[in-house]
Image (cartoon, helix red, strand yellow):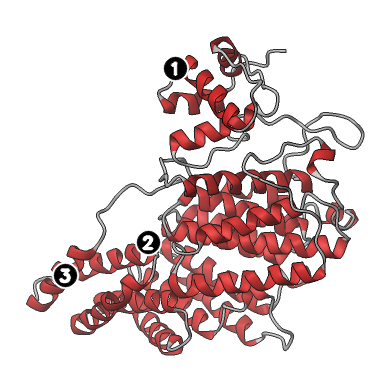
Amino acid sequence: MSKGPNSRLADHFALTGWSKGELARLVNRRGAALGEQQLSTDTSRVRRWIEHGEIPRDPVPRVLAAVFTERLGRVVTTEDLGLERHRPTRSGSTAAPPKDSWEPDRTAAVLTEFTGMDLMLNRRGLVGASAALAAGAVIADNLHDWLTGGAVAAAAARPAPRTLPPAAARGGPRPLLDVHEPGPVGNDEVTALEHAVDVFRAWDASRGGGLQRKAVVGQLNEVGGLLTHGHPPLLERRLWTVAANLAVLAGWMSHDVGLESTAQRYFTIAAQSAREAGDRPRAAEAVSRAARQMLHLGRADDALELMQLANAGAGPGDGAQPRTRAMLRTVEAWALASLGRSEATRRALGEAEELFVQDAAEPAPSWMQLFNEAELHGMQALAYRTLAEHDPGAVPLALRHAERAVLLRQRTGRERSALLDRITLASIHWLSGEPEAGRAQTELALRSINDTSSKRTWDRLREAHRLSARHRALPAVAELREQVHAVLPAPRARRSA
């Protein structure tokens, strides 16, 4: 039955420049390469998909996602193309699930398909075409009730994560790129996966996201395959936590190299995976990563909306430790500072300090281990530096926290974080009218910036370069500005794959 045009598919089709006949031939060719010799797509079928909303049978939606991914140079999923069928519920109904509810099998399917397409993009060396970033409200929509307590009663009544039958038994689609479907795992294997997350996290903090992103995405893809099998509830909850941790890393690494819409999707997947694990603080931290991304992109209003949601979902009653709540306050403060809200910024940073010193004796979860005293001072310095462009009275506080952060970062193995702090310190000196100190810190940053594969560090250096312009009449500063200008990558549209 026709249900009207498929606008999602039509929009993507318009970007390719293909004719309907060309798309039909590409689907048949790609299907044959994947062993699906029976496909016989023609122009009339493509027209029905686009103009009448007809959804083709599996594997055609997955083949379409693959050819669009290759053509557009960014991850395109069957959901992006409007080709998702509603799966039967337990009662046999095919009604769509509520908008604020993702079932575990849907989360696992989205996770596996998205990572599979991302890996294909990596393997073929494609770079991103533009794709729109969602606003904060859109990112948070599926999680709002759960994180703010509107669905607390339902969450409390919800049983432990379900043990899922294999994908083939569920009748769900198999990822195009899977050579084999991994089977169930035991405690030792999950422990090894948890250790791998710690290794990946340390690599990212040291050298940035460019070098290890593909490895993280591949590991996340494997975990998605594991989640299609039944496991005991506790083990399955641990697997969902591993998925959340890996998705946050994949998102942060993607953001670090400028793949912005890909990063946003991973942060959403991370929050959903944390939800399946029943871990509200973990979901809130994932949302805070999306907020930090928005701030880096100059979208402070969206960031503040996301942080309000994250804070609401990580109160003391939700199991969030003081350190987690302190971290969330620092990101909120950065958003407030970006909007020039001085008193609110100072209040949020004061609360962050109070919460940090209240940290209980119990060990923080693995994903909070890196938020230590150095990170606290680094975030405070960044927030006050941002505020200083609206309120010059914030400069002394920014300087104090930046100097403390740089000192604490020494010999920690977190070179990228240390570099970002040093660039923040240089920016503060430019703002405070200390050009000699600003020049010294910028020169130190230039010596080490090529040791990381982080686009964010170059973006921050570009901001410091902008602030140095107020002292360009000084010959030494003018010379330094020429040096920085010579090494800065050419400005370009942000990759959104």
Left/right placement of residue 493 relative to residue 185 reads left
Q: Nearer the viewer, residue 289 or 196?
A: 196
Q: Nearer the viewer, residue 487 or 494?
A: 487
Tag 1: amino acid: Ser
| Residue appearing at x 26%, y 58% in the figure | 489
Whole-percent x, y for residue 125 in the image = 42, 47
- Identify the mark nearer the N-term, 2 or 3: 2
- Identify the mark nearer the N-term, 3 or 1: 1
Helix, strand or loop at mark 1? loop
Residue where numbered disc 1 is placed: 19
Residue where numbered disc 2 is placed: 455
Whole-percent x, y for residue 17 in the image = 40, 23
Tag 3: amino acid: Gln
For residue 257, which numbered disc appears in the image? none
Q: Is residue 148 visible?
A: no
Residue where numbered disc 3 is placed: 483
Helix, strand or loop at mark 2? helix
Which quadrant of the figure contains the N terminus?
Answer: top right
Q: Is residue 127 visible?
A: yes
| Residue appearing at x 64%, y 43% in the figure | 113
Cβ atoms at labels 2 and 3 below 8 Å apart: no
Helix, strand or loop at mark 3? helix
